[in-house]
């Protein structure tokens, strides 16, 4: 299978996940760029930020029209994560590839475990936390975005459910605002490395992801929030195990 076709297929799957789940796109993007398209971990994390930023903007616009974006909570999360995302982006290029891959797998596994835990009574996540805890969580998400080159949605969704107290569908829409802001901030910090990317692969990947995001939003409207959460969690867990095995073996 040619590199172009692989990029288009991987991009479509990434967009579908991001549009439907409000996260998970970058979790799929980084492994696809490394294992299918031959990118180094450092280049893959930078390319992932380009792809996820463009795709999340598309998905955010669709969710905003449906009224599933909580702008105040999302803006607070995003603002707290901007500086950590930029600092993490600058640090990432200095880390060994094995460290990046191992950290990526552990973070994804942790997020999957949190999502697979039985929901709190009422199904709306934990009681809303105070501003300090929300900003602290947002800052942590921003740092993860910068270092690992991920949008942060796979952590933002459970954080918005468990810390802010949003229901799953609202957390999905709101996480896209956080993803967009954090990814862009981290990408700005890596602007110098973006010039060396293989744009013949990144561009079709991003284009297919943007188109897939529209289909993902339609899928989200037809599937229950609990089902989306389980799909999200098992996909994260599978990626985490595969990447951890690659580091260990």
Image (cartoon, helix red, strand yellow):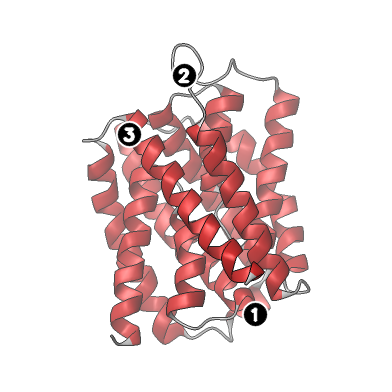
The relative height of residue 71 versus residue 28 in the rendered view (above or below) is above
Residue 103 location, quadrant: bottom right
Image marks 2 and 1: residues in contact by CB distance under 8 Å: no
In front of the other: 2 or 202: 2
Residue labelled with disc 1: 193
Labels 2, 1: front one? 2
Quick check: can you spot residue 185? no
x and y percent of residue 228 in the render?
Answer: 35, 37
Gap between marks 2 and 1 measured at Cα: 41 Å
Q: Is residue 98 left or right of residue 163?
A: right
x and y percent of residue 105 in the render?
Answer: 60, 57
Residue labelled with disc 3: 227
Q: Earlier in the sequence, mark 2 or mark 3?
A: 2
Quick check: can you spot residue 231? yes
In front of the other: 29 or 88: 29
Quadrant (top left/top right/bottom left/bottom right) for the N terminus: bottom left
């Amino acid at each position: 299978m040619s590199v172009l076709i692989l990029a288009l297929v991987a991009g479509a799957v990434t967009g579908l996940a991001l549009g439907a789940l409000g996260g998970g796109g970058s979790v799929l993007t980084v492994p696809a760029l490394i294992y299918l398209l031959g990118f180094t971990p450092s280049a893959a994390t930078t390319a992932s930020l380009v792809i996820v930023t463009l795709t999340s903007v598309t998905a955010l616009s669709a969710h905003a029209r449906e009224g599933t974006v909580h702008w105040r909570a999302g803006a607070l999360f995003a603002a707290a994560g901007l500086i950590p995302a930029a600092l993490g982006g600058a640090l990432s290029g200095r880390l060994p590839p094995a460290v990046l891959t191992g950290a990526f797998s552990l973070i994804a596994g942790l997020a999957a475990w949190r999502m697979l835990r039985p929901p709190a009574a009422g199904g709306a996540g934990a009681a809303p936390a105070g501003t300090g805890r929300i900003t602290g969580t947002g800052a942590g998400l921003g740092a993860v975005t910068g270092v690992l080159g991920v949008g942060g949605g796979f952590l933002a969704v459970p954080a918005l459910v468990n810390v802010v107290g949003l229901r799953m569908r609202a957390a999905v829409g709101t996480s896209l605002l956080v993803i967009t802001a954090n990814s862009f901030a981290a990408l700005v910090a890596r602007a110098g490395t973006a010039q060396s990317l293989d744009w013949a692969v990144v561009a079709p990947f991003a284009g297919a992801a943007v188109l897939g995001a529209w289909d993902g939003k339609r899928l989200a409207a037809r599937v229950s929030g609990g089902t989306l959460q389980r799909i999200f969690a098992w996909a994260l867990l599978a990626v985490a195990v595969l990447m951890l095995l690659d580091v260990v073996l």
